Amino acid sequence: MTDREHLRVSDHDRQAAVERLRIAMGEGRLDLLEYDDRLAQAYRSVTYGDLDRLFVDLPAPGAPPAQERAAVAPRKAGVAAVRSGALPEVRHMPLALKILWTIWAGAMLINLTVWLLVSVSTGGLDYFWPMWLLVPGTALFGVTVGMRAFRRPPGPGRRLPPAP
């Protein structure tokens, strides 16, 4: 161990570590459980060595994002890059929204399947009760659009909110 690892950290150092962990979680490098665990360790840390152990498996703070590294990396011959309009949006969506969309889609799929089986077994189309799942789906869509607008970086026509 070096001498730096034995030096005590300040509250500012802990906050910087917490911010770095938040960024790593936002990039998808940490899941929510890992983030929570490392966050608690960051606030409990006493020395720089304690803080440094939190980032052993994470890239350096100035490392380029994975998209830039992929663009710079040489491509294999004969392999075409598949682009999807929706995939990048899902990749940058917060984890909580990904989970909620997955739950909603699963519930919708199950309800549609049950409705279809009941309709086929009775010989006619029954009341389409799965339509009521569109209400939470619409609310979830509104939250997703709102989060996307909130997380959009400021551009020429968009100002940052005033600092508290």
Image: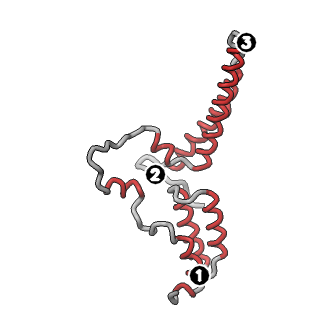
Furthest toward the bottom, the residue is 3
Q: Secondary structure at mark 3?
A: helix
Quadrant where the C terminus is found in the figure: bottom right
Label 1 Cα neighbours within 10 Å, binned few <14 / some 14-19 / many ≥20: some
- The residue that label 3 is drawn on is 122
Q: Secondary structure at mark 1?
A: loop
- The residue that label 1 is drawn on is 9
Comparing labels 1 and 3, the label whose residue is closer to the camera: 3
- The residue that label 2 is drawn on is 154
Q: Position of residue 74 (x, y in %)?
A: 29, 55
Sequence-wise, the earlier of marks 2 and 3 is 3
Left or right? Give the position of 131 relative to 82. right
In this view, 53 is above or below 72: below
Comparing labels 2 and 3, the label whose residue is closer to the camera: 3
Q: Position of residue 80 (x, y in %)?
A: 32, 42
**Residue beneath the point at 66% across and 20% down:** 116
The residue nearer to you, when weighing 160 against 147, is: 147
The residue nearer to you, when weighing 120 against 145, is: 120
How far apart in space, not on screen, are marks 1 and 2 (Cα)?
34 Å
Q: Position of residue 64 (x, y in %)?
A: 39, 62
How far apart in space, not on screen, are marks 1 and 3 (Cα)?
70 Å
